[in-house]
Image: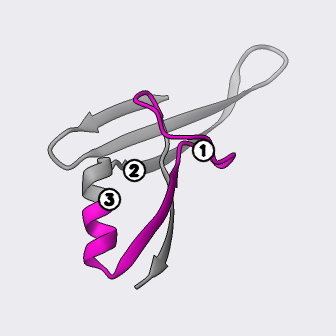
C-alpha cells in the first residue's frame, strides 16, 4: 500500500496494490484501488454538526461505545436534528 497525507486539505490518499501470483511465482494479475480519506478534527466536526442543526448526544471511540480517549483513532457521533 502507498499512502500520502496532505495536511492542508486533511486528505489521505491510499493506493492498494493486489497481485496474483501463479505457482511459478510469476505475477499473473494486478489490481489497484484508490481511496481518499478526509480527516476531520473533533472540534471541526462539532462545529460542522452544530452548524447544520444537529445536537450531539454522545461521542464514542468505537462501535462498542467505548469512551473517547486522547489516543482514540475513531470518533462515532450520535446526533439528533434540533
Rendered residue at 29%/47% (across/down): 41
Report how far apart the C-alphas of labels 3 and 1 lie in the structure. 16 Å
Q: Which residue is tagged 1?
A: 62
Q: Nearer the viewer, mark 3 or mark 2?
A: 3
Seen in the picture, residue 1 relative to 48 is either above or below; the reply is above
Q: For the residues labelled 3 and 1, say whether their Cβ atoms are less than 8 Å apart.
A: no
Q: In the visual, does 1 lie left or right of 4? A: right
Residue 62 colored magenta?
yes
Query: Sequence-wise, which precedes: disc 3 or disc 2?
Result: 2
The residue lying toward the viewer, choosing from 10 and 63, is 63
Sooner in the amino-acid sequence: mark 1 or mark 2: 2
| Separation of marks 3 and 2 at Cα, in angstroms | 18 Å
Left or right relative to 63: residue 54: left
Q: SS for tag 2?
A: strand
Give the residue displayed 25% in from the left and 46% down from the top.
Answer: 10
Horizontal side of 39 relative to 26 (left or right) equals left
| Residue 46, position as x, y percentages in the image | 31, 61
Question: In terms of secondary structure, where does tag 3 sit?
Answer: helix
Is 29 drawn above or below residue 78 in the view shown? above
Q: Check disc 2 and report the residue beneath it.
A: 36
Horizontal and vertical percent position of residue 62: 60, 44
Q: Is label 1 in a helix, a strand or a loop?
A: loop
Which contiguous range is marked in magenta?
46-72
Which residue corresponds to mark 3? 45
**Residue shown at 38%/31% (left/top)?**
3
Amino acid at each position: 500500500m502507498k499512502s500520502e497525507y496532505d495536511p492542508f486539505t486533511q486528505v489521505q490518499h491510499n493506493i492498494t496494490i493486489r497481485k496474483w501470483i501463479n505457482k511459478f511465482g510469476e505475477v499473473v494479475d494486478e489490481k489497484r484501488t484508490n481511496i481518499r480519506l478526509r480527516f476531520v478534527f473533533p472540534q471541526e466536526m462539532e462545529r460542522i454538526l452544530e452548524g447544520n442543526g444537529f445536537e450531539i448526544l454522545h461521542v464514542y471511540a468505537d462501535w462498542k461505545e467505548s469512551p473517547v480517549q486522547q489516543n482514540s483513532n475513531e470518533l462515532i457521533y450520535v446526533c439528533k436534528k434540533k
